[in-house]
Amino acid sequence: MTDTSFDKNRIKILLLEGVHPCAVEALTADGYTNLTRMDHALQGDELVGALADVHMLGIRSRTQLTGEVLARTNRLMAVGCFCIGTNQVDLGAAMVRGIPVFNAPYSNTRSVAELVLAEAILLLRGVPEKTQLMHQGVWQKTAAASYEVRGKTLGVVGYGNIGSQLGVLAEGLGMNVVFYDVVRKLNLGNARQIDDLDDLLATADVVTLHVPANRSTANLMSAERLTRMKHHAVLINASRGNVVDIPALAERIRGGHLLGAAIDVFPEEPKSNNEPFVSELKGLPNVILTPHIGGSTQEAQENIGREVAEKLIRYSDNGSTLSAVNFPEVALPEHPGQHRLLHIHRNTPGILSAINQALSAANVNVSGQYLQTRGEVGYVVIDIEADYSRDVRAALDAVDGTIRTRVLY
């Protein structure tokens, strides 16, 4: 596949799902004015139609970029997920089509951590049930089953960017922090790693989940594990919807084993604000339910908008793929006074040699060359003198195994 020669006015960009306006500002300030922004998600045939001549796509969590959709695109060269997760994109299908996918893994960590800490305080104080009673006209002033967070133990499952920052904030309130992770992690503050998840569950007054969605985390908090939690502990999930057995959680709360829960993500979520929300947890007075808003603050969305827009700009401007989640990562310098050739290919022996032979045959002077591979895909970036034959591009396109090429002037 061959892209048109680099021209910012010819790069068409589509941003869906109400991506923050600062992303538009960043892109247009860099010269990318051929841009459409929509407030809603697109799916299936409607998405395919919208992508017919789009070069860069920006989405959040609702648009499903499946392998089938990607196979029907012709010009798409990069995808920006304006969120942390990338489960909505078939990353493998994007990779083999030479499409890097970028996200914002750090920009909303503070927002999620703050929400979790606030929920821990509210649940230990029994505020959700008390506020519901107040709305019903019931005045129930009592200290029964109401606790301070100071001196309590916070159990963090998944000690990544969010989990570690949450631990620091919790220690500031006087909590003891323990964490479980599948790999050894350097602790922050006085946090202590526990090697067995069941031991953490038996110890923590508050258990908070911060794990990715994969086979090992599916139904991580099963009925059995929920039973192993400390009596009158609370569970908070702001990670992925498939890691908690929701019916079992509802049962443990109704039975009084758990004091309460706060759930922000669900196995099945409405595709829009117009669809109803269904869950076994509805109506339980000591459960906080939020519509997947862990990272939905103005500060987080603005940070995400800038971060992902900058990654798309760097890739489009100079070919840099640093921090792409599915693609060979190459950090590249600027290339003033030179042309930059981008060659994405199947990762098979002999392709780099074939590329260099094509350049040599055309008497092209190479001033810089960068190669990185990842899985099935290889990525070569070549800086050459500005004066070169147009036949060079055709020669690179003809190399067996080529997925796509681009030229940056």
Image (cartoon, helix red, strand yellow):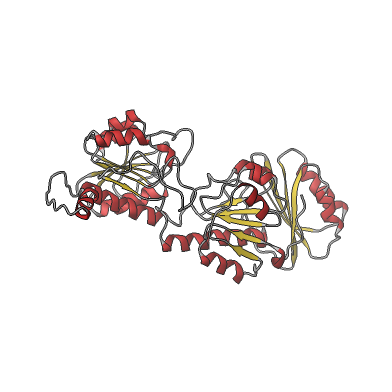
182 relative to 101 in the view: left or right? left
Quadrant of residue 14 in the image?
Answer: bottom right
Count of numbered marks: 0
Residue 157 x %, y %: 36, 40
Report x, y in % for residue 135: 22, 55
Q: Position of residue 322 (x, y in %)?
A: 59, 53
Which residue corresponds to the image point at 61% horizontal and 69% vertical from the top-left? 28
In the rendered image, is residue 373 in sight?
A: no
Say which quarter of the image contains residue 242: top left
Asked whether residue 208 is in view, the answer is yes
What is the x, y in percent for residue 273?
A: 45, 53
Near-viewer residue (189 or 308): 308
At 71% from the left edge and 57% from the top edge, which residue is drawn? Answer: 53
Answer with left or right where residue 6 lies relative to residue 62.
Answer: right
Instruction: State which quadrant residue 35 falls in.
Output: bottom right
Residue closest to the eye, 209 or 151: 209
Q: Seen in the image, is 291 located left or right of residue 83?
A: left
Quadrant of the image containing the C terminus: bottom right
